[in-house]
Amino acid sequence: MPISPKLLNEGETIVVSTRTHPKALLLPILALVLFLALGVAVQQLVGEQVVTLIGWVVALLGILRFTVWPTLDWLTSYYAFTDRRLITRTGVLTRRGHDIPLSRVSDIEIELHLIDRLLGCGTLVISDASTHGRVVLPDIPRVEETKRRVHAMLHEQATETTTRDEGL
């Protein structure tokens, strides 16, 4: 569970906790292969040691920027629905996040492209009744199941609110 218990309020429980689908790592893996191929090609085609060294430095910088950084970003980004709110945390050096109470969620959409359907993931779009507008959560594994669970929580919360209001 990547969500720190320090983020949870007393009595709050996590219902859904996830990060983006490993599909997000396909382009970084492709970049790794391409930059390694570049380094090997320069080494084999140009026998000069200085040019080979420059080729490997360029390849290393490309690997750091287009493979290591996106992988670290993937590892440090996660989303969770608790029984009270949506929590998002992203970023490697600068952490960003949203905490949206479930009572403010006005709509939930999913987007499933062909590749998403094949890989079992999709984009979850949460519309917020306040000024935040929309929160887009890309490449959520089992997005339809997640949407059903969130809808069930919203229905349960609305039922509890109605029952409590009728008791007054």
Image: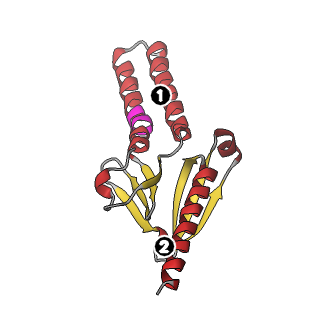
Could you say whether the residue bearing mark 1 is in a helix, strand or loop?
A: helix
* 121 relative to 168, above or below: above
Q: Quadrant of residue 70?
A: top left
SS for tag 2? Answer: helix
| Residue depicted at 39% across the width and 30% down the height | 58
Q: Nearer the viewer, residue 69 or 123?
A: 123
**Quarter assignment of residue 152:** bottom right
Question: What's the CA distance linking mark 1 and mark 2?
Answer: 48 Å
According to the picture, the residue beneath numbered tag 1 turns out to be 35
- Name the mark nearer the viewer: 1 or 2: 2
Q: Going by the picture, which residue comes out furthest to the front? A: 167
Colouring style: secondary structure
Residue 103's mark?
Answer: 2
Instruction: Report the magenta residues as a range.
Output: 63-68
Residue type (three-letter) at the residue carrying disc 2 = Ser
Task: Kindly identify the residue that appears in the image at 48 percent across and 73 percent down.
Answer: 103
**Which of the 4 image quarters holds residue 83?**
bottom left
Name the one closer to the observer, 105 or 57.
Answer: 105
> Dot 2, how many residues are within 10 Å of its Cα: few (below 14), some (14-19), or many (20+)?
some
10 Å crowding of disc 1: few (<14), some (14-19), many (20+):
many
